[in-house]
Image (cartoon, rainbow, N blue to C red):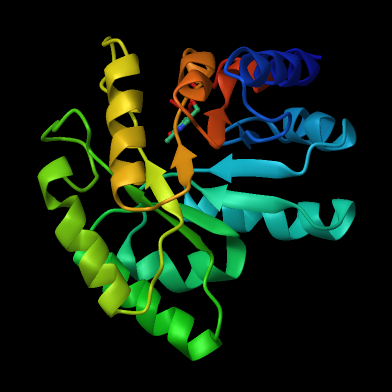
Amino acid sequence: MALAEITARIRAAEAAAGRAVGSVQLIAVSKVQPLERVVAVLDAGHRLFGENYVQEAASKWPDLRARFGPVQVHMIGPLQTNKAKLALDLFDAIHTLDRPSLAQKLAALAQARGSCPDLFVQVNTGEEPQKAGVLPADLAGFLKDCRALDLSPKGLMCIPPEGEDSTPHFAMLAGMAADHGLTGLSMGMSGDFEAAIAHGATHVRVGSAIFGARAYPA
Ligand SMILES: *Cc1c(COP(=O)(O)O)cnc(C)c1O
């Protein structure tokens, strides 16, 4: 199946970049995919998935975890502050920490429960007005605010502008992560994960190349 092919391409890209085998984690992005495709990937032994919508994840993963045992699910879509509590119940990592109000909310919730999922700060590397993410110029201040709230983000995440070469964005994100001593790099999707690995990605988010095209409800 496509999962095996993508995994093989990831291992080859690690080797080509002189990186350790297994240094890149594959997040299988299962948003809006039919359940039978998700089950097929679980049956193949994969245990790390990505979702974009809290409600959809809540309707899917408690049942699938009961059936398949521990599965890591990462939130990779925009997170509304009023869904943060539910998100902490569901997700092992949040890749879309993108604003002070969300940092404050997550900090309060994490304090109350005594644990926090792994956090990645989303950076709007293309400075696109319609896109979420902290602007590159604001990253240092935002990380400082996070640390003042006792949050310690593990890494950075980006979604490069559509139709542009992703490579400069991956290089920029890697540079910013290094500047701030962050080891996680969530970057690379179906069309560009090998380039992301060449630039140091630790987490690639691959959906359609594993599951097939997404059919959004009309
Ligand atoms: C949907 C999505 C992906 C997966 O995209 P594909 O092109 O299907 O691999 C990756 N990252 C984010 C943030 C997404 O929303």
Position of 70 with respect to 57 (left or right) is: right
Give the x, y percent position of residue 36: 78, 31
Measured along the vertical axis of the image, is residue 160 above or below residue 112? above
Extreme residue toward the front, this view: 18
Q: What residue is at 75 percent from the left and 12 percent from the top?
A: 5
Q: What residue is at 74 percent from the left and 34 percent from the top?
A: 38
Position of 169 with respect to 38 (left or right) is: left
Relative depth, front residue between 197 and 120: 197
Position of 8 with respect to 111 (left or right) is: right
Measured along the vertical axis of the image, is residue 112 above or below residue 199? below
Q: Quadrant of the C terminus?
A: top left
Measured along the vertical axis of the image, is residue 104 above or below residue 94? below
Residue 42 can be seen, yes or no: yes
Q: What residue is at 75 percent from the left and 15 percent from the top?
A: 8
Q: Quadrant of the N terminus?
A: top right
Give the x, y percent position of residue 71: 75, 52
Q: What residue is at 19 percent from the left and 56 percent from the top?
A: 140
Occupied quadrant, residue 209: top right
Occupied quadrant, residue 70: bottom right
Residue 160 can be seen, yes or no: no
Give the x, y percent position of residue 128: 14, 31
Q: How many numbered discs, if any?
A: 0
Occupied quadrant, residue 206: top right
Measured along the vertical axis of the image, is residue 188 above or below residue 32? above
Give the x, y percent position of residue 25: 64, 37
